[in-house]
Amino acid sequence: MQKISPFIWFDNNAEEAMNFYLSVFKDSKLVRVAHNPPGAPGPEGAFLVATILLEGQEISLMNGGPGHPLTDAISLTINCSSQEEVDYYWSKLLEDGGNEIACGWLKDRFGLYWQVTPIILPQLLSDPDRAKAGRVMQAMMKMIKLDIPVLKAVADEK
C-alpha cells in the first residue's frame, strides 16, 4: 500500500469508472472492493469504494453522492514515451463522451481530468536554451492533443 494515493469521489458511477480505467490501462488490476455494509447511508450491498492499480499507481474510487463534483483543480497525468502511446490514451479516455480541452488535457466521460503528456515535453521546456523552450511552449499552447514530432521540430528550429 502506498503512503499517499489519490482518492476520487464519484456521484454514483465509481464502479463503472473503475471498470473503464481497468480496461484502458494494460498494466492494471483491482486491489480491493468494498460494498455498503448494513447501516451504511446507501443501499446494503451497493458498490461503495474500490482501490485499483493503474501502471503501478494506487487509486481509490468511491460512490460518495453528488455533493462534491470533480473539477480540473485535480488531474491525473499519464507520462507517455511515444506518439503512439499519446494517441492511444487520448482516444481511449475520450470514448463515449469525453471532452478535449487544450495543451494535452482532457476530461473523460466521468468528469475526471487527465493530462496525456509526452515525457519529452518537460525536457524540452526546461532546456537551457530559453529561446528553444519558448518555441516549444508557444507550439504546445496551440495544441489540443500534444504532437511529439511537431514539438521536436519546433525545438530544433534555428
Image: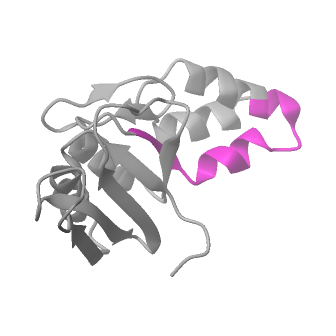
Where, by quadrant of the figure, is residue 85 drawn? Answer: bottom left
Where, by quadrant of the figure, is residue 137 drawn? Answer: top right
Tag count: 0
Tell me: 158 left or right of 75. Answer: right
Q: Is residue 8 magenta?
A: no
Where, by quadrant of the figure, is residue 49 drawn? Answer: bottom left
Q: Which residue is at a point 12% across and 59% down the rendered structure image?
A: 46
In which quadrant of the rendered image does the C terminus lie?
top right
Q: Which residue is at a point 42% across and 63% down the rendered structure image?
A: 59
Image height check: is 62 above or below 100?
below
Tell me: 20 left or right of 9. Answer: left
Image height check: is 24 above or below 101?
below
Q: Nearer the viewer, residue 83 or 4?
A: 4
Q: Which residue is at a point 52% across and 49% down the rendered structure image?
A: 118
The x, y position of residue 20, in whole percent, is: 18, 54
The x, y position of residue 114, in whole percent, is: 43, 41
Image height check: is 73 above or below 23?
above
- Residue at the limit of the structure toward the front, as seen here: 39
Q: Nearer the viewer, residue 105 or 63?
A: 63
The x, y position of residue 25, in whole percent, is: 28, 64
Q: Which residue is at a point 48% across and 23% down the rendered structure image?
A: 143
Look at the image and give the residue range highlighted in magenta.
113-133
Tell me: 133 left or right of 52. Answer: right
Which colour assignment does the render follow?
A: one colour
The x, y position of residue 55, in whole percent, is: 41, 70
Q: Nearer the viewer, residue 35 or 75?
A: 35
Image height check: is 131 above or below 53?
above
Q: Nearer the viewer, residue 20 or 60?
A: 60
Q: Is residue 114 magenta?
A: yes
